[in-house]
Amino acid sequence: MSETIVIAQGGGPTAVINQTLAGAVLEARRRHPGCRVLGARHGVRGIRDGDYVDLGGRSEDELRRIAATPSAALGSTRDKPDAAYCETILAGLRKVSADAFIYIGGNDTAGTQQILTEASGGSMAFVHAPKTIDNDLEQNDHTPGFISAAEFVASAFLSVDLDFRALPGIYAGIVMGRHAGFLTAASAAWRLDDDSGPHLVYVPERAFDRARFVDDIKATMARHGRCIIALSEGISSASGRSLVEDLIPAEMLERDAHGNVRLSGTDLGQAIERILAEDLKGVRARVDTFGYLPRGNIGMISPVDAQEAFDAGVFAFDAATRGGGSVALQEEDGKTVIRLVPLSAVAGKTRHMPDDFLEPDENRLSAKGHAYLDRLLPRRFDPGMPFV
Amino acid sequence: MSETIVIAQGGGPTAVINQTLAGAVLEARRRHPGCRVLGARHGVRGIRDGDYVDLGGRSEDELRRIAATPSAALGSTRDKPDAAYCETILAGLRKVSADAFIYIGGNDTAGTQQILTEASGGSMAFVHAPKTIDNDLEQNDHTPGFISAAEFVASAFLSVDLDFRALPGIYAGIVMGRHAGFLTAASAAWRLDDDSGPHLVYVPERAFDRARFVDDIKATMARHGRCIIALSEGISSASGRSLVEDLIPAEMLERDAHGNVRLSGTDLGQAIERILAEDLKGVRARVDTFGYLPRGNIGMISPVDAQEAFDAGVFAFDAATRGGGSVALQEEDGKTVIRLVPLSAVAGKTRHMPDDFLEPDENRLSAKGHAYLDRLLPRRFDPGMPFV
């Protein structure tokens, strides 16, 4: 099948999304020499606008090099097409006589592929290849991009904890994650011992309570002489509203086209700083917004993540020859296996971090949470223990 | 000489300050087998309080492992002793019959050693071994700790620039640096081509002007379709006040014991976010506070930096046998050489980034600035060029 393949990247970039691109392109060329592979620039916008890169003509060397480069080489988009937009995309795909469209992204991307599948009436194969640092795709044990970002977060917290052993105080690092706490939980992956930070981990899945937060910090300071805190940008109060929404006047909130409040700013950092200054007076306290640093850091690309992302791309092409669907990384006997699942099982759904990854009623990881991280993120550093 | 050596670490930790510690300890033991090496916990506080670690009894393996570990293994302090405090320190050193005191730190640390030298009347050797990510010590071409932190900043900006090629907008990253712009300038070290960010670099040495800032961003957006900005936390307006002081009400400013305004918070990030929201309405804009992430990141330790820091420690012990002084990393024919300089030439002085490291009247690096960074930070990554 498949004389013409269109491929695109959607949503937030990762460290390894270009591996998936390269995997799909190279597999298409291997199995169908002479096939046409068109890369749409900026996701479905490129299809709408007829803006393509001819990926068939690129050398394997160039593709391998771009594979090792973070961020989405074709450009990305936040567009979440509705039915009408999907008709335009379908017309664009027909215009280039596409036999298959492989779209690399998260659950919104899977949603687009589901709409397109239904709209096309089976005339074309639509494949979703997984990608997200949030690790929040249903049907997946973990997602390409997560491990590299998680290693960044784990090493950052290991390092900051060592820093605050030297100069004690309270440290809060705010980590991306609107609905799922996996990436924030990864902050605890490489703790050295029971004294190590992060001592407190706040994720969107557990309601945030200011009084409890302050009490937890006081208890930690009493016990460890310092307090290292990891917070998801999407933490919410019991009312269900994000902390940012609770603390910032409504007219100052920035919303995207889908009405989602922007969380990646420094608002939450400012709010946390205010709480610490008001309720823990006189204690040295510092707040950093990790923001974009973990999600595609060229200095912290996991070889395992890179290989899995590449393999997912290879599999995605195969899936196109089998009629389409969603590519999923699953776990079997402690190993990662790649399987094809229905788009409907992934599209528009958010996988939350299991509640038992945290201790009941506590803001720290459980043995189960640690076991999950240990499997995906074997410790990469073995530092000496400080003399303090 | 030197039967008893006291060693301590002061100021903000770095990725390699423990290399200097290990270098000095191992050299002391090599040249004076059986000598006593006492590590004071939390800098001069440990001497004041008689709180020491016996470093003579630690295995070389343990010392090599702690050398490879970021942050100050002995703990650190922000204490800047006055004459009376120095008398207490001197009494503490005499109590343990110290022949020499090696203090690893920045210009305040050198200042302490200068006061102690004068107060001791030549009865003891005082050595300052250099350490600072700010790279702001006089007499030094660069300082141990800078290269590792600079590589973190360079790779972060290289990565974020790739991210914003995929999803365009304005990005501002705030980097540590109260008075010296070296670390912020390092953001431009690994630009890939003329289109690469950071497109704008703001350092404490150049007055910050809001209107000019906004104009520069507009021009950059028009030319590159995105705008990546690196800002030092210590940027100041023409009035000489830091931007944070200009924008935050005086009663809300946090000051340390020396009256310095705290800059490491998210206040500046908030201020920049406000400027972007007000003056560049509707443009996607994101601000991150790098804060503590660059200064001792275990995933980004430069082998060159590590070796130079170790060598500075070895040299520091030698300097103790020669009566003391300040250890300086200097440049000769493109190589780093270590020399002993007078404490007075370093103590309490700040080395600023040379004005000609930036283009005249522009917020971007000059050829001279790039040449300096190229020498210290040869490019470590060779990514592929994106298709957008």
Image (cartoon, coloured by chain):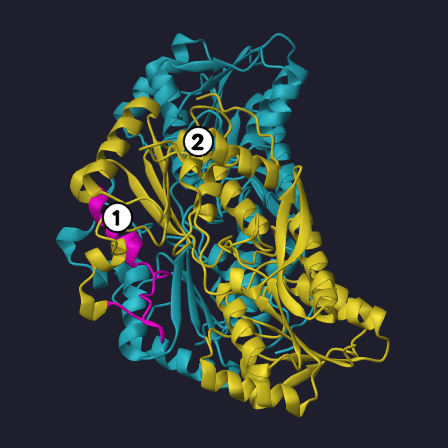
Chain colours: A yellow, B cyan
The nearer-to-camera label among 1 and 2 is: 2
Q: Chain of mark 1?
A: A
Q: Which mark is residue A273?
A: 1
- Of residues A264 and A2, the one nearer the viewer is A2
Indicate whether B7 appears above or below A260: above
- Residue B200 in view of the camera: yes
- Of residues A239 and A320, the one nearer the viewer is A320
- Of residues B27 and A208, the one nearer the viewer is A208
Residue B307: % across, % down: 66, 37
State which quadrant residue B26 falls in. top right
Which secondary structure, mark 1?
helix
Return the residue at label 2: A366
Residue A266: % across, % down: 32, 58
Indicate whether B225 appears above or below B39: below
- Disc 2 packing (10 Å; few <14; some 14–19; many ≥20): some
Do the dots labelled 1 and 2 sit on one chain?
yes
Q: Which residues are magenta?
A: A253-276
Indicate whether B311 appears above or below A302: above
Q: Chain of mark 2?
A: A
Which secondary structure, mark 2?
loop
